Image: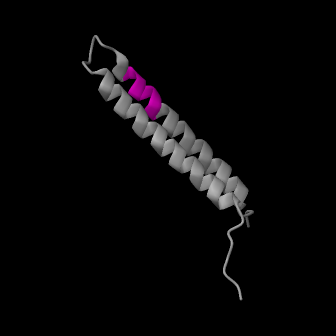
Amino acid sequence: MGSAETKEEKFKRLAELRVNAALDKIRLLGQLSNRGNYDYTDEQVEIIFKALHKSLAETKAKFRESSKDKKRFTL
């Protein structure tokens, strides 16, 4: 019988897969910067990066929240 994957091992395995997939998508996004192939405005670029920044900030906040001791009501 094989050993079960620990929660930390599972986290590391999935984090590596997901971060690498996200980085690949960001690299693809960067290819849109080629003005020889695409037309875009500075405003469109700002909208894209604001959306990315907001999503990263929200995700980072989830990690911070989960690491804090959550206060529970007790009598």
The colour style of the image is one colour
Residue name at image x 42 percent, y 23 percent = 30
- Residue found at the far left of this picture: 39
x then y, percent, for residue 40: 27, 21
Q: Is residue 1 above or below residue 20?
A: below
Assess whether residue 26 is covered by the magenta stretch: yes
Question: Looking at this view, is 6 or 48 the one in front?
Answer: 48
Q: Is residue 53 above or below residue 12?
A: above
- Quadrant of the rendering where the N terminus is positioned: bottom right
x then y, percent, for residue 39: 24, 18
Question: What's drawn in magenta, residue-wise?
Answer: 25-31
x then y, percent, for residue 20: 55, 37
Question: Looking at this view, is 62 or 10 the one in front?
Answer: 62
> Is 70 situated left or right of 14 in this image?
right
* Residue 71 falls in image quadrant: bottom right
Is the stretch drawn in magenta largely helix, strand or loop? helix
Residue name at image x 54 percent, y 49 percent = 59
- Residue found at the far top of this picture: 36
x then y, percent, for residue 49: 42, 32
- Residue found at the far bottom of this picture: 75
Assess whether residue 67 is covered by the magenta stretch: no
Residue name at image x 30 percent, y 28 percent = 44
What is the tally of numbered marks visible in this picture?
Answer: 0
Question: Looking at this view, is 44 or 5 the one in front?
Answer: 44
- Quadrant of the rendering where the C terminus is positioned: bottom right
Using the rendered image of the protein, determine whether residue 10 is visible from the camera's viewpoint. Answer: yes
Using the rendered image of the protein, determine whether residue 5 is visible from the camera's viewpoint. Answer: no
Q: Is residue 71 above or below residue 53?
A: below
